[in-house]
Amino acid sequence: MSKPRKRIDSSFLRTLVGYNARRAALKIMGVFIERMARLELRPVEFSVLSLIGHNPGITSREICRELSLLAPNLVRLLGRLDQRDLVRREAHPDDGRAVGLRLSEAGQALLAEAEVEAAALEVEVTPGLSDAERAQLIALLQRVYR
């Protein structure tokens, strides 16, 4: 039987943006999932609610484009949100074929609570960063994926 290594060399991996972004995302998502469980919200559901709440009348196509979601996956997700009476569908004012989405009163209340929780946990999971450093990190990450 071989002896376990005392320390694993991950020095090369630690030089990679993708590796570090993934490690950070796993930590943050773990806390997010734990905290949002009481609200029965998964990360993607939170993102969709936030987009609808901040963009009343947004279409499914716009949500898919913004979040890089496949349409069939969004249809199922919206079905779950609809069953919970969190979203409303309405005719789009500019395109008679499109449907705009809005939050119901219950959806607005849930989003308000979830956004407070999300903002608090972001600070909690980045204790070594100042507000300015956190803002800089967000800006740098956005430059990678935009």
Image (cartoon, rainbow, N blue to C red):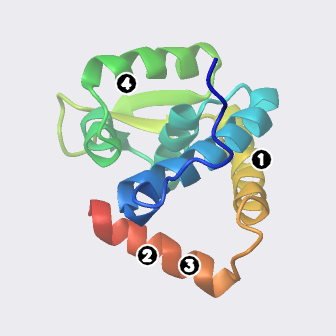
Q: What is the number of the mark on residue 139? A: 2
Q: Which residue is mark 1?
A: 113
Number of other residues with Cα within 10 Å of mark 3, as a class: few under 14, some 14 to 19, many 20 or more: few
Instruction: Mark 2 vs mark 1: give the one in front.
Output: 2
Give the mark, 1 or 4, whose residue is nearer the N terminus: 4
The N terminus, quarter of image: top right
Give the mark, 4 or 3, whose residue is nearer the N terminus: 4
Q: Which residue is at the front of the view, 125 or 19?
A: 19
**Of all residues shown, which one is farthest toward the bottom?**
132
Instruction: Mark 3 vs mark 1: give the one in front.
Output: 3
Mark 4 → mark 3, Cα distance in angstroms: 29 Å
Mark 2 → mark 1, Cα distance in angstroms: 25 Å
Could you tell me which secondary element the residue under label 4 belongs to? helix
Number of other residues with Cα within 10 Å of mark 2, as a class: few under 14, some 14 to 19, many 20 or more: few
Give the mark, 2 or 4, whose residue is nearer the N terminus: 4
Asked if the residue under mark 2 is in contact with the one under mark 3, i.e. CB atoms within 8 Å, the reply is: yes
Left or right: 7 in relation to 56: right
Amino acid marked by disc 1: Glu
Horizontal and vertical percent position of residue 61: 24, 36
